Image (spheres, grey):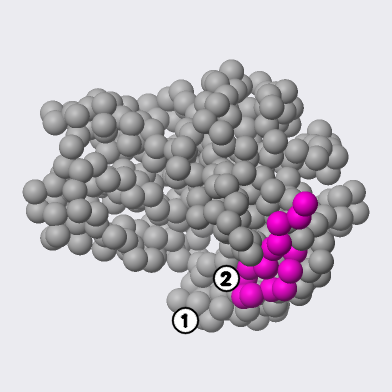
């Protein structure tokens, strides 16, 4: 990942997940209100060692190439490596206060996090420069997966209120964004802390004139009957389900302390696709988890076909300091990377077969800012043969595949 160090002014660089993209807008607004003028703020990710390395590299470059600017690091990597970034010469702002104006005033000192596990979470809305609006509705996680440092970086799960989320959704709609993507660290746990559910939130949002609603990564163990019905029966909820699977072997899942087993996932995907055949399945998968042997890996590899996974988010395991998995017998970085490459190749083959099956079909495409590229309802990547209005939703006929995109022709 190459990070451009911009020429001046107030710059915010978001790493990692869609939630960070949404929260980055709150960071920009807070820093601007605080009067920050010559600053570069890195809203960091720490999902893997590589993610943290990229942040360090970007910070070093910013300090070198913009010596007069204030360099600020916030986000998950800032929580996990605060002292290291401070020693490099950056200012560190904690995750739970990165959206506060006070965090960017010259004399503020709001790190480390204080009371972060009980802090109220405000919904985070991405900027108007995106065709889709990313709407963060919860942060943190109350589970204890052995590989994950999220609880360390973001605290336990906290949800924004339904009313606050509806207000943010109205802002997105008022500025012309016709697709809203709900996101969070553990999205399916939304409402556990305030007496509601993700399904209830989706129903409340659908009372607004939202044309397309998309959900980001879901824990398969938390898709209840109400949410299942919305995913399969509500036309405005897009036919694209991304599942937080992590592995396809029961022993690995047990050692990860995941809350589902392989057979449950295969059964869930079967029911989803039987109820709504157009649904495209995505999944998070980790390769080379500690103790994973060849047979265990083979089960994860087979899951790509067993669950028809066409959008894989695949990465090699990397030990996170302070997590139980870091103390387990490691398989080694080389093996993890090799297995990740095998998973990616298998996923690409599955995706390309699926894309080829889309040729000749009709879909509605959300046009991105360039006026040519975009995504269909099932999130397939499309490229128009002529320009259309950015942000519009247009009917198209799907043409031949070119790599990871399909050609698309505007339909009358």
Q: Which residue is mark 1?
A: 334
Q: Which mark is residue 287?
A: 2
Q: Is residue 96 magenta?
A: no
Q: Which residues are magenta?
A: 398-412
Work out which residue is located at the far left of the displayed protein and give it. Answer: 68
Q: Residue at x 22, y 32 (%)?
A: 104
Which tag, 2 or 1, sits closer to the chain's start? 2
- Asked which quadrant contains residue 51, the reply is bottom left
Instruction: Indicate the position of residue 380 as horizontal and vertical percent values.
Output: 68, 60
Q: Residue at x 72, y 73 (%)?
A: 400
Contact between labelled residues 1 and 2, with CB atoms less than 8 Å apart: no
Work out which residue is located at the far right of the displayed protein and give it. Answer: 274
Q: Which mark is residue 323?
A: none
In the image, 256 versus 198, the foreground residue is 198
Other residues around mark 2 within 10 Å, as few (<14) / some (14–19) / many (≥20):
many
Whether residue 40 sits left or right of residue 163 in the image: it is left
Q: Image quadrant for the N terminus?
A: bottom left
In the image, 261 versus 405, the foreground residue is 405
Q: Residue at x 86, y 55 (%)?
A: 277
> Could you give the CA–CA distance between mark 2 and mark 1, rounded to whole angstroms?
11 Å
In the image, 274 versus 325, the foreground residue is 274
Whether residue 168 sits left or right of residue 26 in the image: it is right
Instruction: Indicate the position of residue 290 as horizontal and vertical percent values.
Output: 54, 69
Disc 1 secondary structure class = helix
Instruction: Indicate the position of residue 328 as horizontal and vertical percent values.
Output: 50, 65
- Asked which quadrant contains residue 398, the reply is bottom right
Whether residue 119 sits left or right of residue 194 in the image: it is left
> Is residue 290 in view?
no
Instruction: Indicate the position of residue 178 as horizontal and vertical percent values.
Output: 62, 37
Disc 2 secondary structure class = strand
Q: Residue at x 50, y 55 (%)?
A: 370
């Amino acid at each position: 990942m190459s990070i451009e160090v911009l020429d001046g002014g107030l710059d915010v660089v978001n790493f990692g997940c869609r939630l960070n993209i949404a929260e980055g807008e709150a960071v920009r607004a807070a820093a601007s209100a605080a009067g920050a003028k010559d600053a570069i703020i890195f809203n960091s990710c720490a999902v893997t060692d590589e993610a943290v390395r990229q942040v360090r590299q970007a910070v070093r470059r910013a300090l070198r190439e913009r010596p007069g600017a204030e360099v600020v690091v916030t986000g998950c990597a800032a929580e996990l490596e605060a002292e290291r970034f401070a020693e490099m010469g950056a200012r560190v702002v904690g995750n739970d206060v990165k959206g506060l104006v006070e965090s960017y005033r010259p004399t503020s000192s709001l790190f480390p996090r204080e009371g972060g596990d009980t802090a109220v979470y405000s919904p985070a809305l991405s900027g108007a420069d995106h065709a889709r609006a990313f709407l963060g509705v919860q942060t943190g996680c109350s589970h204890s997966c052995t590989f994950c440092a999220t609880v360390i970086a973001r605290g336990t799960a906290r949800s924004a209120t339904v009313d606050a989320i509806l207000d943010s959704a109205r802002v997105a709609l008022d500025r012309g964004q016709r697709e809203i993507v709900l996101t969070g660290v553990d999205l399916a746990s939304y409402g556990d802390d305030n007496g509601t559910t993700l399904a209830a939130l989706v129903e409340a949002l659908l009372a607004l004139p939202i044309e397309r609603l998309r959900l980001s990564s879901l824990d398969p163990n938390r898709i209840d009957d109400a949410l299942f019905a919305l995913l399969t029966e509500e036309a405005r909820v897009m036919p694209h389900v991304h599942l937080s699977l992590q592995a396809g072997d029961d022993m690995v899942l047990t050692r990860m302390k995941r809350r589902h087993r392989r057979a449950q996932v295969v059964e869930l995907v079967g029911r989803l696709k039987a109820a709504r055949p157009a649904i495209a399945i995505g999944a998070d998968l980790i390769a080379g988890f500690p103790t994973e042997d060849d047979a265990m890996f083979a089960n994860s590899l087979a899951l790509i076909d067993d669950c028809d996974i066409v959008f894989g988010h695949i990465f090699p395991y990397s030990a996170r300091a302070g997590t139980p998995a870091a103390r387990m017998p490691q398989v080694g970085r080389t093996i993890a990377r090799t297995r990740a490459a095998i998973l990616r190749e298998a996923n690409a083959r599955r995706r390309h077969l699926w894309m080829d099956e889309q040729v000749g079909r009709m879909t509605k495409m959300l046009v991105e800012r360039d006026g040519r590229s975009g995504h269909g309802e099932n999130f397939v990547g499309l490229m128009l043969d002529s320009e259309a209005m950015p942000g519009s939703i247009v009917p198209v006929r799907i043409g031949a595949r070119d790599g990871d995109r399909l050609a698309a022709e505007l339909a009358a």
